Image: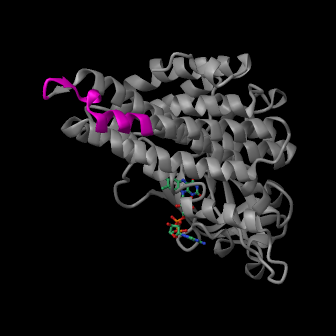
Amino acid sequence: MSALDYDQEYDLPPEAATWRAAAAAFAAETLAPQAREADREGRFSPAMVRQLGAAGLIGAGLPVAAGGGGASLLAACAIAEEIGAVDGSARGFLAVQAGLVLAPLLAHAPTALREAWAGRLIAGDAIGACALTEPEAGSDLGAMQTTLTPDGDEIVINGSKVWITNGGVADILLVFGQTDPAKKTRGLECYAVPGDAPGLTRAPMKGRELGHRASDHAQLTFDGVRVPAAHRVGPAQGGMGVAMLGLEDGRLNVAAGAVGIHRACLEACVDFARTRRQFGKRIGDFQQVGATLAEMDVALRASRLMVHHAARLKDRGLDNAQAVSAAKLHATEAALDAATKAIQMHGSRGYTDELPIERHWRDVMALTIYEGTSNIQRLILGRTLLGRDTEKPSAGGTN
Ligand SMILES: Cc1cc2nc3c(=O)[nH]c(=O)nc-3n(C[C@H](O)[C@H](O)[C@H](O)COP(=O)(O)OP(=O)(O)OC[C@H]3O[C@@H](n4cnc5c(N)ncnc54)[C@H](O)[C@@H]3O)c2cc1C
């Protein structure tokens, strides 16, 4: 579509370009042939997890010392774009396994826990989940009602979680709960809970999801679940920091996945607008259709540059929280708009799952919701611009 190739145009260093090429090849050879059927059947594939692991894509962005690939965050974003362009469910899995489970585990878990789980999770031989959301605590993490009660050298967990990706199949779950409701986010802690822990029950989410149908989303009930106190991930009452560590890179992964969906929609539109003829000419030659392609392209470039900018900041050791929120807000909303335009441009063909664009449209909606809704990104950005109100104490924290 462009005279320049991607790596040239976006000045991708060889390291990131190599990872991007590997992810693109994996997406084309392994994910593309199965994505539609898995979505149709609502089937989560543990085999796909092992394939992702064998290709080195789960651990790509994790430190080499921990068995990861040592890729830059820019490279990890390039991977998420390539996987996201083909299979939103697979990209969602990766974001959870690598970003929300492995990253906090490697940064904060005691050595024994890390050694027991990291290698298996990176290889795709084990599946992880991260359980924050509750029926009464979505964006507002300080409202969490799951209780963590010490009993000797154990912690007893009671409560329920909803919408947990991989929750029904996970071998290990990072479960967040409250030690002191009065402290809100400052009372949160995180514990690693084995999937077979007595007292843990899991069930699929009620209803049929709009998108991400090849993902596993579960509701979890903790009825007196006991774990050793040594399973705590992160400091005492430091659960919010653990959650935010996962969410910061996770949000950028979501933004990069949205760029992938956006790109896939634009590419489909360009192909179609070149070949579909009405009124004796290519539909792309009608000014309104050509202008729509141009708008989709401009928004895509902006999203991709914002994602790369946020990644490059962190790769240089700089704070990128504001850039990540801006990238997630822009990229996910722009991709949703692009997917809507793509269906419209394809006419009736866009309305069936013969083409992947309706799946992209269904999948991308969730990207504007999880790991901080669009409003929550606006809230973070607004707060950052304003600075703290020094006259008002705050215990806010957002998912
Ligand atoms: C496909 C999918 C996968 C998910 N996977 C996971 C997972 O693996 N682990 C996990 O813990 N959770 C997961 N979630 C849950 C997700 O993180 C939450 O849905 C999300 O944080 C929003 O919470 P909520 O749905 O309760 O919405 P609510 O927080 O109830 O928000 C409802 C609406 O109110 C708006 N709103 C709320 N507060 C404010 C405010 N202060 N200012 C302005 N607007 C506001 C929101 O933007 C939203 O539009 C997943 C969700 C989906 C859809």
Coloured how?
Answer: one colour
Q: Quadrant of ligand 1?
A: bottom right
**Which is nearer the eye, 133 or 79?**
79
The percent coordinates of residue 42 (x first, y second) are 36, 43
Quarter of the image where one finds residue 268:
top left
**Which is nearer the eye, 176 or 345?**
345
The answer to whether residue 166 is magenta is: no
Q: Is residue 212 left or right of residue 278?
A: right
The percent coordinates of residue 113 (x first, y second) are 79, 45
The percent coordinates of residue 309 (x first, y second) are 70, 38
Count of marks overlaid on the render: 0
Give the residue drawn at x 24%, y 41%. 351
Q: Is residue 355 above or below residue 382?
A: above
Q: Is residue 106 above or below residue 22?
A: below
The percent coordinates of residue 339 (x first, y second) are 38, 42
**Which is nearer the eye, 137 or 9?**
9
The answer to whether residue 284 is magenta is: yes
Q: Is residue 24 above or below residue 189?
A: above
Q: Is residue 318 left or right of residue 59?
A: right
One can see residue 185 in this view? yes
Quarter of the image where one finds residue 139:
bottom right
Give the residue drawn at x 75%, y 35%. 312
**The N terminus sits in image quarter:** top left
Q: Is residue 262 left or right of residue 67?
A: left
**The C terminus sits in image quarter:** bottom right
Give the residue drawn at x 27%, y 42%. 344
Q: Is residue 142 above or below residue 85?
A: below
- The magenta region covers 279-295
Magenta stretch, main secondary structure, is helix
